Image (cartoon, grey):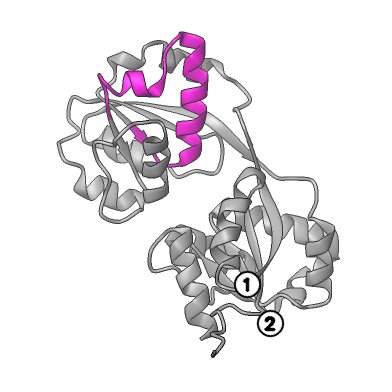
Amino acid sequence: MIKVELPLHQKNIIITRSKDKISDVKKLFTNKGAQIFDFPAIDIGYPDDLNPLDDALSEINDFHWIIFSSSNGIKFVDERLKNFNTSLKECSKKIKIAVVGEKTSLTLNDLGIEPDFVPPEFVAESLIENFPISGYGLRVFLPRVQTGGRNLIADEFRNSGSRVAEVAAYETRCPDSIPQETVNAIASRKVDSMVFSSGKTVLNSAFLLEKEFGEEWLKFLDDAKLLTIGPQTSETCKKIFGRVDMQALKYTFEGLLDAAIDIFN
């Protein structure tokens, strides 16, 4: 019987993501033969000030649309709605919900909610260009990250005549350190690829790498292929790391997996 070698066999890949979400992505890559080194680059929690979020949630049924640009927004809004004796599923009976990406859509599905609109491409520009109705006169709730996110959706809807409540629903913070096993792999220059899922994972990774390895940190990744999930992540990666070796065609972790397989085969 001929043994078929998996496409990422013996490839050492670092995945940068939030601490609580690495395991799901890890399976995608290990199923294709990769050896994964964890690099938690984001801690996620509530914003520093919850009052603006609570103010918006107290009148959530007055909005026409909620637009979620990330799964985290869904998670923290739904969790906080418990304080108002309701849930996102209950609210979805009265309010339309749009999401930017496939993973965000799946997070809604897990709550028993079908989004009313998902753009054809999983970026903010596609949502704006393909939104099913005019924004004029709409009241829009836009839960977002406290710092580092883009204002494009809010700005475009305001320009079209919408009243937009753009509110921090969560914050992403930088962890304190890199796992020792990952430090050892980087130090020995055994890393074949490093995968970035957002601009913040790029920034936080660079901060932690410099903290661990000093000013010469970038040299430890000279031979590693840098893969990014989409255009905004690529822009940040080029600025901080000086290059991007491949960007996912589909802006999902499955797209990143395809990019890894392509670049090594």
- For residue 34, which numbered disc appears in the image? 1
Position of 222 relative to 75 (above/below): below
Magenta residues (range): 67-96
User: In the image, residue 183 lies at what x, y percent?
Assistant: 82, 64
Residue hosting label 2 = 223
The quarter of the picture where residue 49 lies is: top right
Q: Residue at x 59, y 35 (%)?
A: 171
Residue 75 included in the magenta stretch of the image = yes
Dot label at residue 98? none
What's the residue type where badge 1 is placed? Ala
Relative height, residue 75 to residue 91 (above, below): below
| As drawn, 140 above or below 57 | below
Q: Is residue 191 magenta?
A: no
Magenta portion: prevailing SS class: helix
Q: Kindly identify the residue that appears in the image at 63 percent across and 57 percent down.
A: 16
Whole-angstrom CA distance, mark 2 to mark 1, is: 17 Å
Asked which secondary structure carries label 1, the reply is loop
